[in-house]
Image (cartoon, rainbow, N blue to C red):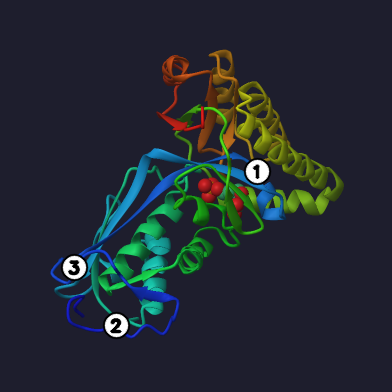
Amino acid sequence: MTASTDVPIAPDARLHAATHGSAAEPGATGRAGAKAILLGEHAVVYGRPAIAIPVRALGARAEARPARGSATLASTLYHGPIARAPERLNVTITAMRAALAAAGRPDAALDIAIDSSIPAERGLGSSAAVSAAVIEAVLGACGLAADDETMHELIQTAERAAHGAPSGLDARTVRARAAVWFERGRIEPVSVGHDLVFVIADTGVRGRTREAVAAVAERRKNDPRGVESALDELGMLATDLRADVSNGDRAAIGDAMNRAHRLLNGLGVGDPALDHLVRAATTGGALGAKLTGGGRGGCVLALARDAASAGELTERLTRAGAAAVWTTTVEGAA
Ligand code: PMV
């Protein structure tokens, strides 16, 4: 297939001709960013709201171009024919196939190159971001682009291959540029009253989202009242937090994060490595800290007092054994 002369037949009517790029361009690119959940992971699976923030320091980029021979994939995990790619790349391949099917070109052979700085399985939305980048690049190579809803559905198709019945929070937030409120599948912007400086520390332990989601479901079967009350509290914390973020009340935001961490531990999705970094963050001056994402490993999100104390917090978390530390600022009106 060629991106230049063919007029694509797109059975999915919601796709439209790409406006960027030119026919002479050899390949098309797609991009998406990392995300961190400020509050509401796991509770969103049961219809409660959540707030997520973009992590601008980390991102995924994909490039797709017509293949010379059979389709190939190039990433840090693998370089070779798609037909022989390891199972770990199933989500990415599902994303590629979903995009090709939507473009009406299920059999098109593309060479896809992926470059991502988002660590995988750390609760930072790596799978959704890589999928989003691949889908955008594949559609672009077919001369097409998707609206937000269609993009979301295509990313969700890939996310289902990653963890069963995803809430859609990751799929929505990896394409968001600012803090978002997520409720029942949809996002809205969150007003931010004051700059919020967050430090994210990686335990180095792989997060196990699928397992953690299953553990919460099992606990809910055995202790419906206890789990529902924790989920309700997480929902209320998220609602109050939205107002705290809007008012720039950092102390209240920190308190909510600390409480959420305890509730998540109570739901069985914690890990000693997470507790260790949460303690290091709070004793190191953070206003609050919690696990972020699916849990059972992955990352800790801590709220720093300001940019200067984020530097001290970074040192503290590194000394405490964090495998990597990033800082991200959510910009406020003041
Ligand atoms: O670990 P992550 O980044 O995939 O985040 C998962 C968030 C959960 O609420 C645990 C699951 C979901 O589908 O929202």
Secondary structure state at the residue bearing disc 2: loop
Secondary structure state at the residue bearing disc 3: loop
What residue did someone put label 3 on?
A: 22
Of residues 262 and 5, the one drawn nearer to the viewer in this rendering: 5
Q: Position of residue 20 (x, y in %)?
A: 26, 64
Give whichever of discs 3 and 2 has the lower sequence position.
2
Q: Disc 1 vs disc 3: which is toward the camera?
A: 3
Please state which amino acid type lies under the numbered disc 1.
Gly
Of residues 87 and 285, the one drawn nearer to the viewer in this rendering: 285
Please state which amino acid type lies under the numbered disc 2.
Pro
What residue did someone put label 2 on?
A: 8
The crowding category of the residue bearing disc 2, from other C-alpha atoms within 10 Å (few below 14, some 14 to 19, many at least 20), is some
Of residues 9 and 210, the one drawn nearer to the viewer in this rendering: 9
What residue did someone put label 1 on?
A: 40
Is residue 144 found left or right of 232 in the rendered image?
left
Is residue 236 found left or right of 292 in the rendered image?
right
Q: Alpha-carbon distance for marks 3 and 2? A: 15 Å
Please state which amino acid type lies under the numbered disc 3.
Ser
Q: Position of residue 56 (x, y in %)?
A: 39, 39
The relative height of residue 266 versus residue 309 in the rendered view (above or below) is below
